[in-house]
Amino acid sequence: MTFRLAAAALAVLLLCAAPGLAGSLLATWRGPDGREYLGKWPDGIVPWVYNPAGAPEGLRDEALVTGLLREAMGQWEGVCGVRFEYRGGSDAPVWKSVPGTLLVGWGGGRGDGAAAEAGPAWAATPSEIAARGYLPFTDARVRLARLFDWEGGSDAHTASRTLAVLVHEIGHVIGLGHSDDPWSVMFASPYTNLLYPRADDAATVQRLYGPPEKPGGIPRYAPPPQGALRASGVRFAREGARHEPLAALPGPEAAGREPVGLRFALQDAPAGTIEVVLVDPSGVFHSGQAFPHPGGTVEGLVGLLPADALASLPGTWTAYVLFDGKSAGAAELRTGRGE
Ligand SMILES: [Zn+2]
């Protein structure tokens, strides 16, 4: 007899995985004997396919999305012994399952603004489970929400936003739940959109798949040298009506959910490209946005993250304004419970 839990039900389980429990990052599922088990891909190999049908405007390019998926998967390969194998395109609808395979595709969304949901399914007899000691995953799905706002004003922002979502969802696919450590890509209250698995993620996922074949590193961001053009009034600011400047945020509970952006002005700039780069308090690239500038004076505010997401990672955030690849200014924002 084969026991099987629908992936949709698992996805719900994963999305609700016990917040507040220390060390709760590994997801568990109830086996046929009523006991809780970890789940993983047998042999650590995850074959995958991608169905581009229904992709939203900025993500219609199939090569772009599969490239981002490879990047997200590569980051997990860099911290544990899991391996992903691309098996090409697929026309399987994302509510179906492809046996033995991870299916990534697009669906309408859950109506609560979530970017995606993901979950593995497993199948085994009680004696197989007893012999293995874990639930063997047989297939999985990542359903990306077509209705989510993937666009952030530039291709670079769309790509980094999408990558952050994919790294988190692939974590679910290989057996992780949500972490209660904000310095984890599996943290979800609120989502901090980190681009790389961190210490908590790496240590936990290695309990399932062992150490990586080729350990990856997390690159620290080094700003480019100062250019001739200087931005003025560079500061973090709340996105509310008055763009109130912000030098510090209290802890996440008190910070509020209002979006925070970077305010700056460039006087008489030539035509070129303006970039805004956000670097997290550990010095790692968080996200980037690029805007073509037709020339002239520009003054404005570029959205970064909600206040509570920034506040959940304590320390000093830095945002850089770049013009044609050279530094034009920077601002800092202190966050933490002590503020
Ligand atoms: Zn999640």
Image (tube, rainbow, N blue to C red):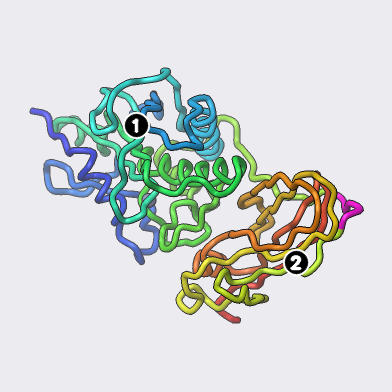
Mark 1 vs 2, N-terminal side:
1
**Residue found at the very far top of the displayed protein:** 88
Local SS, label 2: strand
Label 1 – label 2 distance at C-alpha: 48 Å
Residue 46 appears anywhere in the view? no
- Magenta span: predominant SS is loop
Q: In which quarter of the image is residue 297?
A: bottom right
Q: Nearer the viewer, mark 1 or mark 2?
A: 2
Q: Between residues 42 and 328, which one lies in front from this camera angle? A: 328
Q: Quadrant of the N terminus?
A: top left
Q: Residues within 10 Å of mark 2 (few under 14, many from 20)?
A: many
Residue 199 visible, this angle: yes
Tell me where residue 242 sits by quadrant: bottom right
Please name whichever residue, 39 or 329, is drawn nearer the observer in this view of the structure.
329
Q: Give the range drawn in magenta.
A: 225-229
Judge: label 1 CB < 8 Å from ligand 1. no
Amino acid at the residue labelled 1: Trp
Amino acid at the residue labelled 2 = Val
Answer with left or right where residue 177 lies relative to residue 224. left
From the image, tell me which residue sits under label 2: 234
> Residue drawn 12% across and 29% down?
2
Q: Which residue is drawn at 41% across and 58% down?
A: 188
Task: Determine the image quadrant of residue 159.
Answer: top right
Q: Give the image location of residue 187, x and y in percent.
A: 44, 57
Residue 28 coordinates in the image, percent (x, y): 27, 48
Specify whether 188 is left or right of 318: left
Residue that label 1 marks: 41
Q: Is residue 78 magenta?
A: no
**Above or below — where is 147 with respect to 71?**
below
> Which image quarter holds the C terminus?
bottom right
Q: How crowded is mark 1: few (under 14 residues within 10 Å), some or many (20 or more)?
A: many
